[in-house]
Amino acid sequence: MPDASKVNSMFARIASKYDLANRMLSFGIDRIWRNRLVEEVDVRNPETVVDLATGSGDVAFALRADLPDSTRIKALDFCAPMIEEAKRKQVALNEPRIEFGVGDILELPLDENSSDAITISFGYRNLEDRHKGLLEMMRVLKSDTGHLFILEFSQPHPLYRPFYYFYLKCVMPFFASLITRDLEAYKYLCSSIESFPDRAGITRELEDAGFRDVIAIPMALGSVALHIGRA
């Protein structure tokens, strides 16, 4: 699994160009994936939501735009420069109704049984210990009623896979390095996706950690999946 200190350093290096790179490299489709996540959170009517591995805050801002004003939203990331980017966006958007802070998923600065929903988008595969992270998220979620939402890369449909990995290995790192000046960060992205479990594998990880009623919703020909589990 990834080394946490190296992941932290990598995101710190690319923080200022993170949003631009995401938009260009996903051709803007990342918004569609986030919107599906927000829809699934919304139908469960949470009073408190925590967005983990929030990065520059895109998911937190999308949640805030869609959920009722009464819903409390906290957003955490273990990389301080990414949180600074999120706070800059918060000022620019004049959106004070999100509490941003630094926090490690493996040791969350949150009370037990305190959150109705936890979201994590494209950060789960970066955890140094995924099982420990799931147990920590389970601790924070309200028993029986709390839900975990993991939006993450997955293994695409076999017919699409050769084209997908050609883009991931050959095209994306080149253009990403032009934007961020950090080729190694996007080589890591490719290797972390290639070695990541498929939907069935992540479903087993959630179930092994005690999550119930786990479902996996494939998107983008299976290259992305939204996993939902009840605490």
Image (spheres, rainbow, N blue to C red):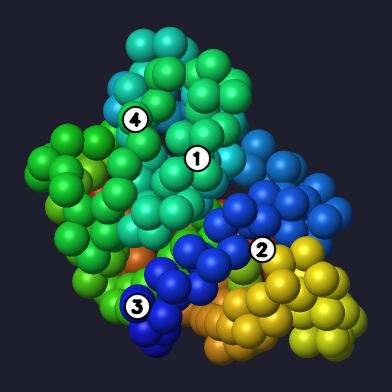
Q: Quadrant of residue 126?
A: bottom left
* Dot 4 alpha-carbon crowd within 10 angstroms: few under 14, some 14 to 19, many 20 or more: some
Mark 2 or mark 3, earlier in chain = 3
User: In percent of the image, x 47 and y 78: which residue is there?
Assistant: 201
Crowding at mark 1 (Cα within 10 Å: few <14, some 14-19, many 20+): many
Q: Is residue 152 above or below residue 140?
A: below
Residue tagged by mark 3?
A: 5
The three-letter amino acid code for the residue at tag 3 is Ser
Of callouts 3 and 4, which one flags the residue occurring earlier in the amino acid sequence?
A: 3
Name the residue carrying label 4: 99
Task: Compare residues 168 and 135 and report the one nearer the observer.
Answer: 168
First of labels 2, 4 by sequence position? 4
User: Who's the residue at 82% across and 56% down the image?
Assistant: 24
Between marks 4 and 1, how big is the CA–CA gap?
Answer: 10 Å
Q: On the rendered image, what quadrant is the N terminus found in?
A: bottom left
Q: Residues within 10 Å of mark 2 (few under 14, many from 20)?
A: many
Residue 225 pos. (x, y %): 61, 61
Q: Identify the residue at image location x=17%, y=36%.
A: 114
What type is the residue that disc 4 sits on?
Answer: Glu
Of circles 4 and 1, the one toward us is 1
Q: Identify the mark at residue 224; answer none if there is no mark.
A: 2
Query: How far apart are the two marked residues, 2 and 3, measured between alpha carbons?
Result: 26 Å
